[in-house]
Image (cartoon, rainbow, N blue to C red):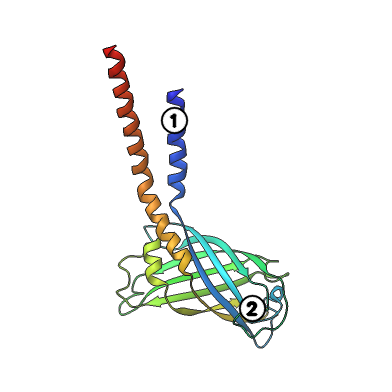
Amino acid sequence: MKKFLGGLAILLCTTLCGSAEAATVGFLGSINQGQPGSHTSVPNLGSFPRNFSLTLNYTINPGGGVTPATGAFEFLATPNTGTSNPNSHPPILALVNGNITVANNNGPGGTDSFQFNGNTPVGQLNPTHQVNFSFTFTNPVSTISSTSVDPVNIAKLIGGQTSISFTSPTVSGVGVIRGAPEPSTMIALTGLIAGGCGIGYRRRMKAKGDAEAEETTAEEGC
């Protein structure tokens, strides 16, 4: 039984600690207008401006390069606080697929950047078309020292506000996007969990082993 429980504990730790390699980053923003003056690229939204939150989940990639991410847009019901949209529309949740790219310097004399290129499948924001979107945050050359796609680099690169563009085969939409403070804090905690999980487990097993050793010694002395 002890061997079974020990194996179960190792399995659980492997599962939980392994999952800590996944991280999350969040954004807040709004889609403000369609080009040229139409909403047909994202008709499910009804009208603009419209506030949203965007959450992206990815697996930490120390080697850098194109890193897959999935997540979701949550468009708030309108009217939205702080926008000029008086129309009434229900909230919308739209799934997201795409890729994160972290660039270190972008070549000689360039800048460091975080970029996401993604899409929402057919039916999510447009009943007949996939809607593509992209945005890029740029910072000075010295912001990061590697292209690792991880919470530390991403937190350094995302700051202030940048533009976000939406395109489909018909019309485009444009808006703004910025980092969300709470998810940024949570991805930092994810990194702490990844670093501390195995250590905590080893300490518990060592304490268990010391206790069993003391128990054996006491039994031998009886």
Question: First in sequence: mark 1 or mark 2?
Answer: 1
Q: Quadrant of residue 101?
A: bottom left
Residue 85, above or below 200: below
40 or 4, nearer to the observer: 4
How packed mark 2 is, by other alpha carbons closer than 10 Å (few <14, some 14-19, many 20 or more), is many
Which quadrant: the C terminus? top left
Residue 32: x and y, percent? 60, 82
The percent position of residue 72, horizontal first and vertical second, equals 59, 64
Q: Residue 80 bears which disc, if any? A: 2
| Disc 1 element | helix
Look at label 2 and name its amino acid: Asn
Instruction: Give, as a three-letter code, the residue at label 1.
Output: Gly
> Could you tell me which residue is drawn at 32 percent across and 72 percent down?
143
Q: Separation of disc 1 and disc 2 at Cα?
A: 52 Å
Question: How far across and how far down the image is residue 98, in percent?
Answer: 54, 64
Tell me if mark 1 has few (under 14), some (14-19) or many (20+) residues whose alpha carbon lies within 10 angstroms of its own.
few
- Image: 191 above or below 116: above
Name the residue carrying label 1. Answer: 7
Q: Which mark is residue 45?
A: none
